[in-house]
Image (tube, rainbow, N blue to C red):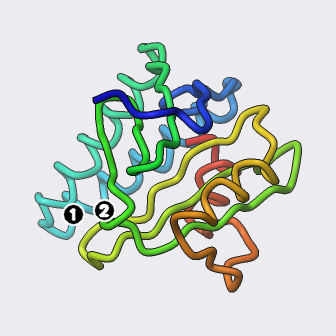
Amino acid sequence: MLQTTLASWNFPEYKKHNRNLLWYALVFSLAAGLLAYAILSINYLFAVFIILTGAVLILRHKNKPLTLKCQIKPAGLSLGKRFYAYGDLDSFWLIYQPPEVKSLYFSFKSKAKMRLSIPLGNQNPVKIREILLKFLPEDLTKEEEPLSETFARAAKL
């Protein structure tokens, strides 16, 4: 049975930042310092973590982000190949502070799951809010972008 799509848009899996030589020099210096500290303090697990983090950053830089499709449907949210039923979601909230922050967030009923963040792109946040209010409560206590996302954006991660 096909479901009606109430709203739909595409967005990149992650934002590809333009980084200059200074950014790479700072990150390499920080990684080298942390790696030296890990080795000197005989913390090899931390050293492996630093190396793996560097490898992930390099791979993300070399690869183009996938384009994901978000679809809001009467039964839930379709995000790429994943489907999230409204019964699994606790609430939603919007942070709309253009041009930097235009995001839709979902919290899960299961506290073991992290929040879900979806860039709105050129979507009308009022329209998205009206659609979602039919299915989920809005968390009006959240008025700012999560600190982790603010840091990631500022650090161009």
Residue 25 sits in quarter = top right
Q: Going by the image, does 13 lie left or right of 89?
A: right
Q: Going by the image, does 148 lie left or right of 43?
A: right
Q: What residue is rendered at 35% in x and 37% in y?
A: 54
Q: Going by the image, does 47 lie left or right of 120?
A: left
**Viewport quadrant of the C terminus:** top right
Residue marked by disc 2: 37
Question: Is 52 above or below relative to 40?
Answer: above
* Nearer to us in this view, 122 or 132: 132
Q: What residue is rendered at 50% in x and 35% in y?
A: 71
Please provide percent x and percent y for residue 109. Answer: 33, 76
Please provide percent x and percent y for residue 108. Answer: 37, 70
Please provide percent x and percent y for residue 137. Answer: 57, 76
Total marks drawn?
2
Residue at the outermost right position: 98
Q: Say what secondary structure mark 2 lies in.
A: helix
* Nearer to us in this view, 27 or 127: 127
Residue marked by disc 1: 40
Q: Going by the image, does 123 lie left or right of 88?
A: right
**Viewport quadrant of the N terminus:** top left
* Nearer to us in this view, 57 or 148: 148
Please provide percent x and percent y for residue 107. Answer: 45, 69
Q: Say what secondary structure mark 1 lies in.
A: helix
Q: CA distance from mark 1 to mark 2?
A: 5 Å
Q: What residue is rendered at 47% in x and 42% in y?
A: 73
* Marks 1 and 2 close (CB-CB < 8 Å): yes
Count neighbours of disc 2 (C-alpha within 10 A) and say few if under 14, some if 14 to 19, many if 20 or more. some
Q: Amino acid at mark 1?
A: Leu
Q: Amino acid at mark 2?
A: Tyr
Q: What residue is rendered at 29% in x and 67% in y?
A: 113
